[in-house]
Amino acid sequence: MLPFFDGNDYNEWKVKMTSFIQSLDYNLWDIIVFGLEMPKETISKTRMRYDEKEKEIMKVNAKPKHVIFCALSSNEFDNISSFYSEKVIWDKLEEMHKEKNVEKTTTCLMALEKNENESDEDDARKGENEVSYDDFVDDVDRYTLIISTLQNMIKFFTVENNELKMSISSMNENESKKGEMGLLKKENSCLFKENE
């Protein structure tokens, strides 16, 4: 099947077209690559006056040109239809799409470079956050010590809090006993006064 070229993916089309033409007739490929010597006319003569050898050369020249023309979209055909030689046609296609490929390659390289720079920045940011194994172990040990100290302080304050509560409770009991004793003394003194 003849590879069709619509202006996209020239390099892929070129490889397929090369293979296609070589599979038809390797001599056709040689004509495209190296060109073909057309009959030289020292005296201007019409095609009708070509001899058989010259007619065969013209026929051989028309085949690769026909194959190339059939493989092109209308836009691509318009770009090269004015050229007579299939070698010139092939070279012009290469030249036109090489410029496009250079633009695409440049764009791709710029995008790749930008992506690599962003990736390097991301790696640098990640590097800032990375911790070695030894540093990690040291951090875990430090946090374990802090947690252990806090737990001991909680126990200490809990015991102290309980002791404080007991002291307050016993003080309250003492106060209430003192109050009761004071009342008893008052009652006793009242009773003594009555008895006298």
Image: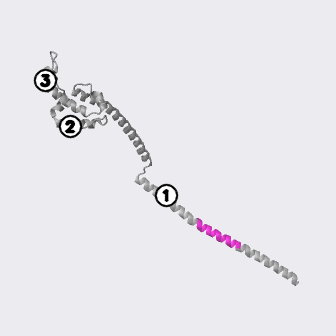
- The single residue placed furthest to the front in the displayed view is 48
Q: Amino acid at mark 2?
A: Phe
Q: Amino acid at mark 3?
A: Glu
Which disc is residue 171 wearing? none
- For residue 98, say whether it is visible: no
Q: Residues within 10 Å of mark 2 (few under 14, many from 20)?
A: some
| Residue corresponding to mark 3 | 54
Label total for image = 3
Q: Which residues are magenta?
A: 157-172
Which of the image's four quarters has the N terminus?
A: top left
Which disc is residue 20 wearing? 2
Q: Nearer the viewer, residue 163 or 45?
A: 45
Give the mark nearer the N terminus: 3 vs 1: 3
Which of the image's four quarters has the C terminus?
A: bottom right
Q: Nearer the viewer, residue 39 or 141?
A: 39
Give the mark nearer the N terminus: 2 vs 3: 2
Q: Position of residue 27 (x, y in %)?
A: 15, 32
* Color encoding of the figure: one colour
Q: Nearer the viewer, residue 187 or 31?
A: 31
Q: CA distance from mark 2 to mark 3?
A: 26 Å
Which disc is residue 143 wearing? 1
Q: Nearer the viewer, residue 83 or 158?
A: 83
Q: CA distance from mark 2 to mark 1?
A: 72 Å
Kindly indicate whether the residue at mark 1 contacts the one at mark 2 (C-beta within 8 angstroms).
no
